[in-house]
């Protein structure tokens, strides 16, 4: 990934890990350039436009899955780029995604017991 | 709540904390804490979304969701919130360059976009009430207002934090690593945005 | 980094030898700097002081919850009894459970975690000391808030899991349930902040060389528990919000007559509630896993298995919640799935029991009181675990649901498991925390009275339950008590007598504490020949915990520094003493240790929360005032550096170590 700050702060204290895995503390040096963020935002805007457009055209049974996939793409894009998760330590991803998947798991299971997906 | 207040350097006693500090994982305490908080928030919003999903069809005595929802308006406000994520990330980027002026500018723009979103939500709520859906009208109303209300409160808290941050940056009153504080609030802000990405699709676009 | 303040006020240091300058925070208050007197406790951020405060307050709530239990047993001691009215009885069992779960076992585990985790991993404090203080005050104020409901129209009376429609305004018109919902929100904040704090501490603040698999087992179990809290608390938060909105703002989330699904509450509650069960018991598992090796003079058998089974329990604990709801008509598929999942969780629990037993096997056993409680846990918890397996079998569970059999089961696992573990911890770590040994003779009385008492109290409940005595039943009559061995009157009386034996057992502990505190003499620094890092410092530890942060090479580092194994014979022999190790460490002592500084903000911020809660119930204006307090406190907090300014510390004299924030008398 390209680094935008030539003026990388001199006192950066990355890589002090004393267990060998020298993670950077993530605050500096990683991520996209400002232009890169704008591009990501453009993609997100386009996807949102697509989502809204889909509600006005009839694509039949594809409607729901396509919308859900678009939602997941937008979600992951924001998390990966804007929230830097792609460039940061795996531990952050673990913490966040374990909460997310746990939430999806338990609440889907609970809705299943309500026969929620059995067709209203 | 307390997340804004967390910028505690580790209590390692060495007298060298002027040159930063080492941690066992090499990661910042604050960032670890923030990501855990966000992981935890997933279960909070998951519960609220599930409640809404369970009850969205129970709308006796009020217009149905598809009659009520104003998709063009909500699409615009969703777009505004999405763009506030961009301005937030630009603020973080400026803060990492130690560019205080641009940091404050982008933070202010983010707060304004957030306020626009909240304003649209207030407008939407009053419209719904006018059309016959109040908080206590039926289960659909209760769960809809609870879910979107919780999200709105999160946005509002974010706006307060952003404004406070602008004030603190302008007076140099931030203890600790300024860029990291901006990044923390940024993470919170993006999280509020991704929750809305889900709400927008599940609540507004997919009809019951 | 630090805030520069224009006009520092010089003041005299406690020692009278140096001038110190408390910096201001938010331009209003000077930072608290007292190291003696009540201020040194109220504004402290020291994890050890907070741990002790957690312990004291939790013990007070234990006594309150115990008195509530005794009143319940008094009411059931005789037929047609009138000790408690039906309404008072409902409040009593609701608050007994709520107090024991949320205000005793959870905070008592937090007490041990706070005190010991930084010591066990060789750190000088937790990662967020002010957040730690904030958590304690939330717990205290939340607990007080909950209990003031007794005097403000009556406590919650809906049972501790507060099923709809018992919580509906029609069935619980007092403010009790409102107090319950809001009070648990406040203590929930304490748990959530505590969880984040301790996880970061364990992940980030370990001493050099202490990899995750060299961490003491207690720290490991606390880590698992904090993850459970992290993800379980928001679920109950949602449930409690929905409940509050229903009662205070006219929503109908759980009202069947308005078309709602009351099962929604049950799901939300138990998605939180089942991990909660492990939140209660895993800290005690950690404690006995520390105690058993020390008093067997053997390493913990299968350390890795104990760690992974603990993590497995934590993970599987998320997939079994609906076994609390087998009788609610979930449908055969759901019941079958959750039934199998529940049986699966018996496996990692069984692994732990086997590991503990194997730790004892062939060891040089010393039956101190701490050891007795640990062994007691293995036995009593196993009994409770076995009756638990009978609940996993859905048809059998359907019979037992809402009978005393359930009451028997969870008291065996919670009293015989969680509480026994905590008592083992009291006896084991008392000399660490207070430099006094709890009296062993009184300790034996304490243990045996508690064992006899708990089996007399909860054992008969198996019989009562299988005979069909419903849980939460307020009166029984001789007329319908049955005959012979299964006579309900007889077993109810036995249980009531047992509860008083149990109470006397607990009283023995309190007497022991008073007696020990009054006795002169100082405990040896390493009285049990212990294994982990918390013993490799003075007792009680200095404010900065360790003069030199130890470098860790082994699991059970302290033991490995004291003993070596003869390669040929496999025998261990002592190579070093506590004093020698400490002298060695002293040569590397750090100078100028800057500890996190005391702060006013945690207690002020926490104080705003009950104000909001009272306001929501009685007067909205008060809630607004509380919110303002919270907001201002957050501003004050975020502008205050966690470690005080350099100028706040007494200047090093002749290059000597300055360890504490200078005192102002």
Image (cartoon, coloured by chain):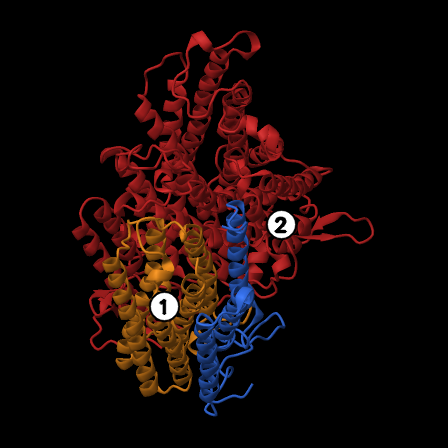
Chain colours: A blue, B orange, C red
The x, y position of residue C132, in whole percent, is 39, 56
From the viewer's perspective, is residue C41 above or below residue A43?
above
Q: C137 and C14: which one is in front?
A: C137
**Subunit that carries the residue with mark 2:** C
Marks 1 and 2: same chain? yes
Q: A53 and C388: which one is in front?
A: A53
From the viewer's perspective, is residue C394 above or below residue C83?
below
User: Does residue C240 appear in this view?
Assistant: yes
The x, y position of residue C318, in whole percent, is 55, 48
Residue drawn at the location 44% of the way across and 72% of the way down: A56
Indicate the quadrant containing the C terminus of chain C: top left, top right, bottom left or bottom right: bottom left
Q: Dot 1: few (<14), some (14–19), or many (≥20) neighbours within 10 Å? A: many
Circle 2 sits on which residue?
C312
Which is more N-terminal, label 2 or label 1? 2
Q: CA distance from mark 1 to mark 2?
A: 38 Å
Q: Secondary structure at mark 2?
A: helix
User: Does residue C444 appear in this view?
Assistant: no
Which numbered circle lies on residue C391? none
Quarter of image, res C627: bottom left
Q: Dot 2: few (<14), some (14–19), or many (≥20) neighbours within 10 Å? A: some
From the viewer's perspective, is residue C539 above or below residue C491?
below
Circle 1 sits on which residue?
C643
Q: Secondary structure at mark 1?
A: loop
Indicate the quadrant containing the N terminus of chain C: top left, top right, bottom left or bottom right: bottom left
The x, y position of residue B54, in whole percent, is 44, 50
């Amino acid at each position: 990934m390209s680094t935008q700050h030539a003026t990388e702060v001199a006192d950066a204290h990355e890589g002090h890990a004393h267990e060998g895995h020298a993670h950077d503390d993530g605050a500096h040096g990683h991520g996209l350039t400002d232009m890169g963020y704008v591009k990501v935002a453009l993609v997100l805007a386009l996807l949102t436009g697509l989502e809204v457009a889909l509600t006005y055209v009839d694509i039949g049974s594809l409607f729901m899955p396509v919308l859900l996939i678009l939602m997941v793409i937008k979600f992951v894009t924001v998390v990966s780029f804007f929230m830097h998760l792609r460039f940061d330590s795996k531990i952050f991803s673990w913490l966040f995604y374990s909460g997310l998947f746990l939430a999806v798991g338990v609440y889907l299971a609970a809705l299943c017991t309500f026969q929620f997906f059995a067709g209203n | 709540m307390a997340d804004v207040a967390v910028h505690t350097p580790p209590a390692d006693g060495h007298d060298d904390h002027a040159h930063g500090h080492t941690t066992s994982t090499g990661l910042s305490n604050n960032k670890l804490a923030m990501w855990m908080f966000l992981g935890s928030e997933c279960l909070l919003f998951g519960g609220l979304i599930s409640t809404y999903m369970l009850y969205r069809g129970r709308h006796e005595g009020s217009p149905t969701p598809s009659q009520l929802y104003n998709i063009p308006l909500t699409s615009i406000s969703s777009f505004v919130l999405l763009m506030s994520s961009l301005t937030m990330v630009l603020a973080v980027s400026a803060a990492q360059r130690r560019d205080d002026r641009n940091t404050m500018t982008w933070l202010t723009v983010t707060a304004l976009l957030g306020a626009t979103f909240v304003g649209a939500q207030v407008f939407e709520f009053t419209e719904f009430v006018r059309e016959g859906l109040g908080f206590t009208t039926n289960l659909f109303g209760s769960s809809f207002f609870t879910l979107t209300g919780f999200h709105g409160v999160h946005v509002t808290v974010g706006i307060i934090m952003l404004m406070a941050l602008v004030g603190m940056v302008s007076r140099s009153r931030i203890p600790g690593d300024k860029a990291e504080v901006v990044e923390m609030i940024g993470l919170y802000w993006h999280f509020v945005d991704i929750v809305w990405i889900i709400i927008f699709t599940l609540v507004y676009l997919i009809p019951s | 980094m630090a805030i520069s303040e224009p006009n520092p006020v010089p003041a005299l240091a406690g020692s009278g030898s140096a001038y110190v300058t408390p910096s201001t925070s938010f331009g209003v208050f000077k930072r608290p700097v007292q190291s003696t007197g009540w201020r040194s406790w109220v504004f402290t951020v020291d994890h050890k002081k907070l741990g002790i405060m957690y312990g004291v307050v939790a013990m007070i709530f234990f006594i309150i919850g115990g008195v509530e239990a005794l009143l319940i047993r008094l009411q059931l001691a005789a037929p047609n009894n009138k000790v408690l009215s039906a309404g008072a009885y409902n409040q009593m069992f609701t608050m007994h459970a709520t107090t024991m779960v949320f205000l005793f076992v959870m905070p008592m585990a937090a007490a041990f975690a706070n005190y010991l985790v930084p010591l066990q991993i060789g750190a000088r404090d937790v990662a967020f000391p002010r957040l730690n203080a904030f958590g304690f005050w939330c717990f205290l104020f939340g607990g007080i808030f909950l209990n003031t409901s007794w005097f403000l129209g009556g406590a919650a009376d809906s049972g501790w899991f507060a099923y709809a429609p018992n919580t509906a305004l029609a069935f619980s018109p007092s403010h009790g349930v409102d107090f319950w919902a809001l009070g648990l929100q406040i203590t929930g904040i304490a748990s959530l902040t505590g969880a984040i704090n301790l996880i970061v501490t364990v992940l980030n603040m370990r001493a050099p060389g202490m990899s995750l698999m060299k961490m003491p087992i207690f720290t490991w179990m606390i880590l698992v528990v904090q993850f459970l809290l992290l993800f379980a608390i928001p679920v109950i938060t949602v449930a409690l919000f929905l409940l509050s909105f229903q009662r205070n703002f006219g929503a109908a989330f759980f009202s069947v007559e308005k078309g709602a699904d009351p099962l929604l509450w049950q799901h939300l509650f138990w998605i939180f509630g089942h991990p909660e069960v492990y939140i209660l018991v895993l800290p005690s598992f950690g404690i006995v896993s520390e105690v058993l090796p020390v008093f067997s003079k053997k390493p913990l058998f299968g350390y890795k298995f104990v760690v992974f089974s603990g993590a497995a329990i934590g993970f599987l604990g998320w997939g079994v919640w609906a076994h609390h709801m087998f009788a609610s008509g979930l449908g055969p598929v759901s019941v079958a799935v959750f039934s199998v999942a529940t049986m699966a969780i018996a496996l990692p629990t069984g692994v732990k029991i086997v590991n503990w037993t194997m730790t004892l096997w062939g060891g040089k056993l010393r039956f101190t009181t701490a050891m007795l409680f640990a062994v007691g846990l293995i036995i009593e918890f196993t009994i409770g675990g076995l009756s638990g397996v009978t609940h996993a079998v859905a048809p059998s569970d359907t019979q037992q649901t809402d009978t005393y059999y359930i009451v028997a089961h969870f008291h065996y696992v919670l009293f015989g498991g969680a509480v026994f573990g905590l008592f083992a911890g009291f006896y084991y770590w008392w000399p660490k925390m207070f430099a006094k040994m709890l009296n062993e003779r009184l300790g034996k009385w304490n243990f045996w009275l508690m064992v006899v008492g708990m089996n007399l109290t909860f054992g008969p409940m198996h019989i009562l339950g299988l005979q069909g005595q419903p849980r939460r039943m307020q009166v029984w009559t001789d007329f319908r008590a049955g005959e012979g061995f299964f006579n309900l009157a007889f077993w109810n009386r036995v249980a009531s007598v047992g509860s008083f034996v149990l109470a006397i057992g607990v009283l023995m502990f309190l007497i022991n504490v008073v007696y020990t505190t009054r006795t002169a003499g100082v405990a040896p620094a390493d009285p049990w020949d212990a294994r982990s890092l918390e013993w490799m410092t003075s007792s009680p530890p200095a404010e900065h915990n360790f003069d030199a942060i130890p470098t860790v090479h082994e699991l059970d580092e302290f033991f490995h520094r004291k003993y070596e194994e003869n390669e040929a014979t496999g025998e261990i022999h002592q190579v070093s003493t506590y004093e020698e190790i400490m002298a060695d460490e002293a040569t590397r002592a750090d100078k100028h240790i800057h500890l996190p500084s005391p702060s006013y903000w945690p207690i002020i911020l926490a104080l705003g929360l009950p104000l909001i809660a009272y306001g929501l119930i009685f007067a909205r204006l008060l809630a607004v005032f509380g919110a303002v307090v919270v907001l201002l406190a957050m501003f004050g907090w975020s502008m205050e550096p966690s470690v005080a300014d350099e100028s706040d510390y007494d200047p090093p004299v002749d290059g000597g170590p300055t360890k504490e924030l200078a005192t102002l008398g």
